[in-house]
């Protein structure tokens, strides 16, 4: 299934006992969707593409703004005003021409979410807003699609993984969308650019592990937990999550 140029390209993966040729073929046959080609989406897309994840869809409705360039390393100064999704596709296709990449310049909403989230092995959410995080969680729980949700603000970042039917979901923790003025956004409160690199790289690493079948009961990584980083102290905390029995998103699922 892997061609000789692919075997060379992925040799540092294939050398790993946890990957080998079979694992690399699994990555090649994997299908993921990345919500948001911004600060988190940049490292996520680079590392998933570089790792050889075979089919990647990227969704982002925004165009590149000068204020994005402090952390959104997919883009160049000369590209201000252009579509993020289109440029993201171009950039990661240049990095790896052996994979299939689709870009959609659209914002995820109630009407299109089923279409974009179904038939994925994993969804990676890295948007800059809570509406999209809640919506992605709700639809993934409904469709039974595993997901990784990440967020960054100021010097803080977090990642959590949800395997519907196994792990508590995003709504089990936060229950309802916070009021629009309750939590500031990066554009209001700022963010250290490197946080996108750290948290996005954790998200990408957890994604590759998940696709390889390395997320297990004994070693669940961030699935079933939230990993939080306070970059001022450089302290990481991983907190196990509890299911909310009346959760609107996941209480219908039979849990293992
Ligand atoms: Zn839930």
Image (spheres, rainbow, N blue to C red):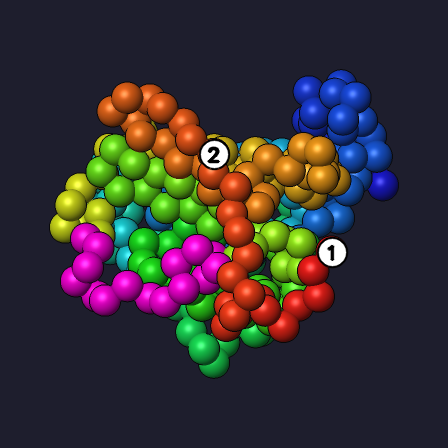
Residue at the farthest left position: 188
Residue 125 in the image, given as x and y percentages of width and height: 46, 53
Magenta stretch holds residue 179? yes
For disc 2, the neighbor class at 10 Å (few under 14, some 14 to 19, many from 20) is some
Image vertical order of residue 190 relative to residue 245, above or below: above
Label 2, secondary structure: give it.
strand
Label 1, secondary structure: give it.
loop
Look at 78% across and 35% down and name the residue there.
Answer: 23
Q: Is residue 99 visible?
A: yes
For disc 1, the neighbor class at 10 Å (few under 14, some 14 to 19, many from 20) is few
On the image, which quarter does residue 156 sit in? Answer: top left
Front residue of this view, candidates 238 and 25: 238
What number is the disc on residue 39? Answer: none
Q: Which residue is identified by label 2?
A: 238
Front residue of this view, candidates 224 and 66: 224
Image vertical order of residue 13 relative to residue 126, above or below: above
Sequence order check, earlier mark of 2 and 1:
2
Magenta: main secondary structure: loop
Q: Is residue 98 visible?
A: no
Magenta stretch holds residue 11? no
Residue 24 in the image, given as x and y percentages of width and height: 76, 35
Q: Which residue is identified by label 1?
A: 256
Image vertical order of residue 197 relative to residue 11, above or below: below
- Is residue 31 shown left or right of residue 244? right
Look at 76% across and 26% down and name the residue there.
Answer: 18
Real-space Cα distance between discs 2 and 1? 22 Å
Does any atom of ligand 1 lie closer than 8 Å to the CB of label 1? no
Q: Which residues are magenta?
A: 170-184
Residue at the farthest bottom position: 111
- Is residue 181 shown left or right of residue 135? left
């Amino acid at each position: 299934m892997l061609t000789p140029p692919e075997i060379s390209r992925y040799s540092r993966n294939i050398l790993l006992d946890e990957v080998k040729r079979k694992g690399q073929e699994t990555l090649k046959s994997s299908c993921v969707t990345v919500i948001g080609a911004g600060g988190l989406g940049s490292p996520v897309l680079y590392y998933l593409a570089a790792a050889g994840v075979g089919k990647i869809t990227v969704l982002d409705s925004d165009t590149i703004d000068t204020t994005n360039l402090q952390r959104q390393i997919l883009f160049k100064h000369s590209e201000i005003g252009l579509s993020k999704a289109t440029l993201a596709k171009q950039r990661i296709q240049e990095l790896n021409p052996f994979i299939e990449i689709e870009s959609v310049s659209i914002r995820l909403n109630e009407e299109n979410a089923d279409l974009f989230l179904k038939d994925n092995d994993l969804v990676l959410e890295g948007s800059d807003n809570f509406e999209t995080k809640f919506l992605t969680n709700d639809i993934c729980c409904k469709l039974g699609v595993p997901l990784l949700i990440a967020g960054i603000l100021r010097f803080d970042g977090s990642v959590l993984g949800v395997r519907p039917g196994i792990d508590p979901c995003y709504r089990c923790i936060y229950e309802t969308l916070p009021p629009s003025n309750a939590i500031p956004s990066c554009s209001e409160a700022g963010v250290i650019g490197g946080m996108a690199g750290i948290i996005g790289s954790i998200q990408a690493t957890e994604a590759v592990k998940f696709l390889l079948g390395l997320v297990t009961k004994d070693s669940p990584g961030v699935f079933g937990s939230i990993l939080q980083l306070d970059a001022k102290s450089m302290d990481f905390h991983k907190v196990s999550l509890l299911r909310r029995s009346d959760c609107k998103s996941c209480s219908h699922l039979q849990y293992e």
